[in-house]
Amino acid sequence: MEIREIGKSGIKTSAIGLGCWAIGGGTWWGENDDRMSVETIHKAVDMGINWIDTARVYGFGHSEEVVGMALKEIPRDKVVISTKCVLQWYEEKGEFHFSRDGHMVYRDLSPKAVRRDLEMSLKALGTDYIDVYYTHWQCKTYGLVPIADTMGELLKMKEEGKIRAIGASNVDLRTLADYAAAGQLDVIQEKLSILDRRPEAELLPFCEEHGISLQTYSPIEQGLLAGKASNNYVAKPGEVREGKLWWLPENIAIANEMLAGWKDLTEKYGCTLANLCIKWNSMLSPNIHVLCGARKLSQIEDTGRSLDIPLSREDFLRMKADADSAIARRVNP
């Protein structure tokens, strides 16, 4: 398994991470077999995938609890654990974000809320430190909570040994620059797939210049790039894919046409379409760590093979050109 450093933290981890959003279940993902989720985490670690990522809000605490169950059976120093704060449903403070499963969720980046979330995560995970601690979403109103205040609390936690590295997720360039100016920021987590490369324009160059890692999520567009979705697929109400741009039937058809054109590549490299897209993601920059969701053994076993593909630069560029063509044809309602 390829190893890459997280920013300037000194923490070295697998270039692929295991994302545990789906493990949280709920109306986003449906019900889960928690024991299977635990076994999936163990299998990932056995395969050399040692970065396990979760968040306080995933399953409203359930994902962290399941990861905590898995940690009981793994030496703590064998894994890098990241989780996220800011999204809270305990009180009506901060900016409203969404409602789901009977919870009203707010973005609260205040030092008090960040501290509270950390203590709750430590308890749920059954550990006394978090390797990478992310702010999950940023204030909608710029400056509502100054980034320097949030970072001040995060830096205190780092000094206390409760976190080892600081991350921020779902940022724009201005907010990213504010974090970097306020203290050592080691990683950001952003959505990036071959069909959605928004961080490529501004965020990735900033990260490369400042020694900040980019952990990309949804590299296969929540399953679309695995090539198994029918053109007439319609997401169920409340499902995570509902309303997503590439999951509109018209756009599924465009993506499937692109994927069908890569049959020769899957044969050439003896891999799946998902493997191709994950490998492509990792080749975009040496600063990138690719976060891949899985909650079944078959999923993580397939994902774990992705970085072994000897994808050539020529085929990398061919895939990029095909994706650019698909993006140009995409329906934007």
Image (cartoon, rainbow, N blue to C red):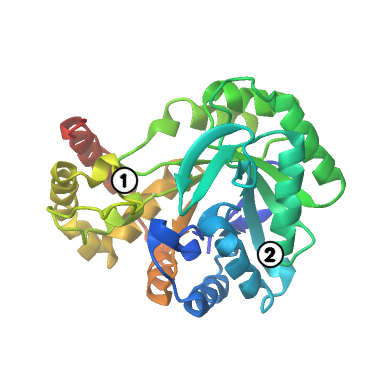
Give above or below for 182 relative to 243. Answer: above
**What residue would you read off at disc 2?**
125
Q: What is the x, y in percent for residue 108? A: 64, 36
Give above or below for 166 relative to 11. Answer: above
243 relative to 137 in the view: left or right: left
172 relative to 163 in the view: left or right: left
Circle on res. 316? 1
Give above or below for 111 relative to 17. Answer: above
204 relative to 312 in the view: left or right: right
| Mark 1 or mark 2: whose residue is earlier in sequence | 2
Q: Residue at x 72, y 41 (%)?
A: 114
Say what amino acid the circle numbered 1 marks: Phe
Say what amino acid the circle numbered 2 marks: Leu
Q: Quadrant of residue 41?
A: bottom right
In the rendered picture of this protein, how many numbered marks are placed on residues?
2
Quadrant, the C terminus: top left
Q: Quadrant of residue 295?
A: bottom left
Residue 183 showing in the rendered view: no
Residue 326 showing in the rendered view: yes
Disc 1 versus disc 2: distance between alpha carbons? 38 Å
Density class for disc 2 (Cα within 10 Å; few <14, some 14-19, many ≥20) is many
